[in-house]
């Protein structure tokens, strides 16, 4: 075990734990190292102590020698391959990948308590597991939900019918293994349901009173879009200080932008919202068992421009069969893939700009604090949603 405590520069990222009382630093450090030891990760971690405006902090970071080998240039997509992790067959391996990616990060993940850190890891694991099981029908104009679970109104969105469980209803809606049917979603709304399910599962474990309020909220009106982001999520990275192109933590929500102006005018094809599942894979809600790699996602987004046509109603549409065929052809040609990636693996441009940017966003999103005493979520009840 590497228990050396040394000064750590604030810019080094990793996991940062806040401690209200200086005399509790040792106990907090021992708790987290015990957690890491149970996963056989403690020997790879450096610990530093810092003082800030709000008190004392512990910073845990992957030792630089391991970081260089396992996550060169902050590339976390190869962690499973390099360490032989089986995150689908072994839940502890998924937890290991989540923690290692956070410990190796270029930006600090701050937590107000050890309990919040553990809940944050569990929520990420819930999102990954839910994302793997989610299969839906893509539709930007229509939306379906199990009628026995939900009712709809324009003012309230899809709300729970009396007596229906939020967790069971979300599972039935997103996982055909539970319902036997595919329901229609846009990719953005689909990510909200998967995240909500991951949050609800952890609240049932760590904060039942807040879970009850969440259940009550979805009986009153749904929280969606910008309001969902503001209440439930924290965004890290920015266009002025972007995250490394291949830095992802399992459970991150992120956006791939369509950098082609013409095809981005097709509703639903402005870009693609996904989760990072770990092991180099991103969610594909529309095709069972065919999750994306970074390469296949970039190639698909590139070929959206080749599937554009104008329908009989005069609206621009995209022929997915054409796109799929073009993707298959490209993936058989390494030189063509390299040329596509050279165009797509660039930072996206600001909204409304289509010059020479790529599809990679500068930011990722993860869930806010959920534990009693440090929860950062306040639900609106029946207050009307803010304007988009």
Image: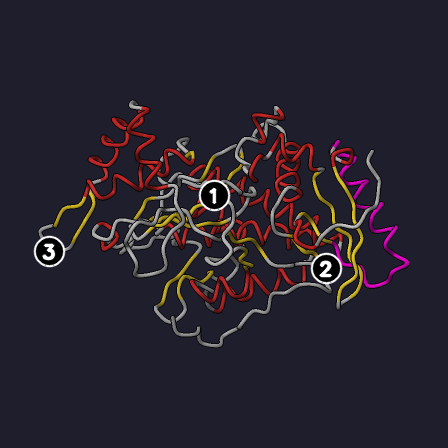
The residue lying at 80 percent from left, 60 percent from top is 56
Point out residue 376 in the picture as x, y percentages from the top left corner.
63, 65
Q: In this view, does 343 lie to the left or right of 49?
A: left
- Mark 3 residue element: loop
| Mark closest to the chain's N terminus, 2 or 3 | 2
Which element carries disc 1, helix, strand or loop?
loop
Q: What stretch is highlighted in magenta?
A: 17-40
Residue at coordinates 77% horizontally, 36% vertically from top-left?
A: 42
Query: Any magenta on residue 160?
Result: no
Q: Residue 314 carries which label?
A: 3
Q: Are marks 2 and 1 in contact (CB under 8 Å)?
A: no
Residue at 53% across, 43% down: 248
Give the camera-side residue of 211 and 160.
211
Is tag 1's residue or tag 3's residue first in the polypeptide sequence? 1
The 10 Å Cα crowd at callout 2, few under 14, some 14 to 19, many 20 or more, is some
Give the side of residue 336 with respect to residue 74, left or right. Answer: left
- Find numbered disc 2 in the image and state the secondary structure of the residue it sits on: loop
Q: How far apart are marks 1 and 3 (CA)?
A: 37 Å
| Front tag of 1 and 3 | 1
- Where is mark 1, residue-wise? 245
Residue that lies at the very extreme toward the left in this rendered image:
312
Question: Which residue is at a point 47% across and 60% down the rendered structure image?
Answer: 160
Percent position of residue 172, x then y: 46, 46
In this rendering, is residue 183 above or below 293? Answer: below
- Which marked residue is nearer to the observer: mark 2 or mark 1? 1
Q: Characterize the local packing of mark 3: few (<14), some (14-19) or many (20 or more) Cα atoms within 10 angstroms.
A: few
Residue 29 on image: x %, y %: 83, 48
Task: Classify the position of the N terminus by image quarter.
Answer: top right
Q: Mark 2 points at which residue?
A: 112
Q: Give neighbour class at mark 1: few <14, some 14-19, many 20+ (Cα, 10 Å).
A: some
């Amino acid at each position: 075990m590497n228990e050396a405590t040394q000064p750590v520069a604030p810019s080094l990222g990793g996991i940062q734990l806040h401690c209200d009382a200086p005399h509790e630093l040792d106990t907090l450090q021992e708790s987290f190292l015990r957690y890491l030891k149970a996963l056989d990760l403690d020997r790879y971690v450096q610990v530093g102590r810092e003082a800030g405006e709000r008190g004392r902090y512990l910073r845990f970071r992957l030792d630089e020698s391991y970081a260089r080998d396992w996550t060169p240039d902050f590339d976390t997509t190869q962690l499973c391959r390099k360490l032989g992790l089986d995150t689908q067959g072994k839940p502890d391996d998924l937890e290991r990948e989540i923690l290692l990616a956070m410990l190796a990060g270029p930006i600090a993940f701050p937590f107000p308590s050890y309990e919040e850190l553990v809940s944050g890891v569990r929520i990420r694991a819930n999102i990954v597991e839910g994302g793997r099981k989610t299969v839906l029908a893509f539709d930007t104009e229509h939306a379906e939900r199990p009628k026995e679970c939900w009712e709809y109104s324009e003012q309230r969105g899809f709300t729970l019918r009396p007596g229906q469980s939020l967790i069971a209803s979300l599972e039935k809606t997103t996982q055909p293994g539970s319902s036997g049917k595919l329901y229609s979603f846009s990719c953005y709304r689909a990510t909200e349901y998967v995240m909500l399910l991951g949050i609800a599962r952890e609240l049932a474990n760590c904060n039942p009173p807040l879970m009850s309020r969440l259940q009550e909220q979805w009986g009153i009106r749904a929280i969606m879009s910008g309001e969902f982001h503001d209440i439930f999520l924290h965004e890290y990275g920015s266009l002025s200080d972007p995250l490394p192109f291949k830095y992802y933590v399992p459970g991150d929500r992120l956006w791939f932008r369509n950098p082609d102006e013409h095809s981005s005018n097709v509703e639903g094809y402005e870009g693609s919202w996904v989760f990072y599942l770990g092991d180099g894979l991103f969610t594909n809600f529309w095709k069972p068992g065919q999750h994306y790699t970074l390469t296949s996602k970039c190639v698909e987004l590139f070929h959206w421009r080749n599937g554009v046509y104008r329908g009989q109603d005069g609206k621009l549409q995209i022929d997915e069969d054409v796109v799929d065929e073009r993707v298959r052809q490209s993936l058989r040609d390494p030189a063509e893939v390299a040329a596509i990636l050279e165009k797509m693996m660039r930072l996206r441009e600001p909204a409304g700009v289509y010059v020479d940017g790529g599809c990679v966003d500068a930011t990722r999103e993860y869930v806010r604090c959920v534990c009693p005493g440090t929860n950062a979520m306040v639900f609106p009840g029946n207050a009307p949603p803010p304007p988009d």
